[in-house]
Amino acid sequence: MTDDLPVPVDRLTHAASAVFALVFSLVVASLIAQLATSAAVGVGVVAPDTNAFTILRTVASFVGFLPAVVGYLLITDQRDLVSVSLPSLREVGLIVGSAVALYGLQIGLLLTLREFGFGTGQNPATVAAGDPAVYYAAMIAVSILVVGPAEELLLRGVVQGGLRRSFDAAPAILIAALMFGMLHGNVEGTAVEQAAYMGVTVVLGSILGALYEWTENVLVPAFAHGLYNAIIFAGFLWGAL
């Protein structure tokens, strides 16, 4: 990743391009999720308000990031923007260690907020629509294979990677983390609880951004993120058994 800084107008261009990439991906993913769930309901594969429907919508939404990201890279002629390679044995260890550290950090942040009388909103993805054990078990796999990789490909690979073309590491990581936080603002709760949830997400996103900056391999934060989410769902699964 280069440290050569262009003129300020280029910084604004890359910042605007990062915002466009995020919005474009969200729109495309939303359309794909809507089409997939509508088609599945229409042919009777799934029914609304069921675990199967929620899981399908989640998978379709995040898989929808892929064509959006590919389209963005082709439209902007930035095919080499995302840095990706097969994780080494050292990076596999880093993935596992980072996921555990992220989970521990989240617990610490939540306990700290609680000490000051603050709570965080509840992510709708953690609420089962049917048998909770089945749902949480499925979401463990979805987190590792779909959610983590998709979000990191977009937020770290495209957004942070694009910002790094004209920003130093710290502001690029922070801006991408702020976008990551805003992406998680649709949680249930009061405005204060939603803000607290996004704040925790920004901190965690900054760690994932630092991982990408350090390793220059988007698969490291991708699987660390997915494994971190899987640990959370494993906790819910344990409680549901």
Image (spheres, rainbow, N blue to C red):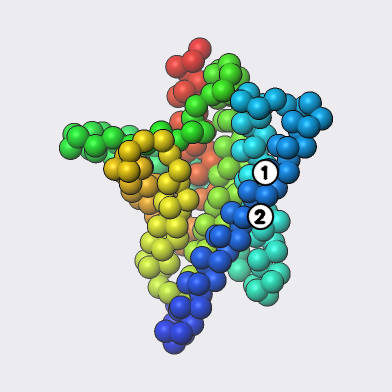
Number of callouts in the render? Answer: 2
Residue sitting nearer the eye, 11 or 33: 33
Q: Marks 1/2: CA distance? A: 9 Å
First in sequence: mark 1 vs mark 2:
2
How crowded is the residue under tag 2: few (<14 C-alpha within 10 Å), some, or many (20+)?
some
For the residue labelled by badge 1, is the local secondary structure a helix, a strand or a loop? helix
Residue at which label 1 appears: 33
Residue sitting nearer the eye, 132 or 49: 49
- Inspect the image, locate mark 1, and give the three-letter code of the amino acid beneath it: Ala
Residue sitting nearer the eye, 71 or 156: 71
- Residue drawn at (40%, 73%), measured in percent from left and top? 168
Q: Is residue 168 above or below residue 126?
A: below
Residue furthest out toward the bottom: 7
Give the left or right position of residue 202, taking residue 45 as reference: left
Disc number for residue 109:
none
Q: Is residue 48 above or below residue 19?
A: above
Whether residue 89 is visible to the viewer of this picture, yes or no, is no
- Residue drawn at (46%, 84%), measured in percent from left and top? 9
For the residue labelled by badge 2, is the local secondary structure a helix, a strand or a loop? helix
Residue furthest out toward the left: 116
Whether residue 122 is visible to the viewer of this picture, yes or no, is yes
- Residue drawn at (65%, 74%), measured in percent from left and top? 76
Give the left or right position of residue 27, taking residue 46 as reference: left
**Residue 217 percent across, percent down from the top left:** 56, 58
Disc number for residue 28:
2
Q: Is residue 6 above or below residue 118?
A: below
- Inspect the image, locate mark 2, and give the three-letter code of the amino acid beneath it: Val
**Residue 3 percent across, percent down from the top left:** 45, 77
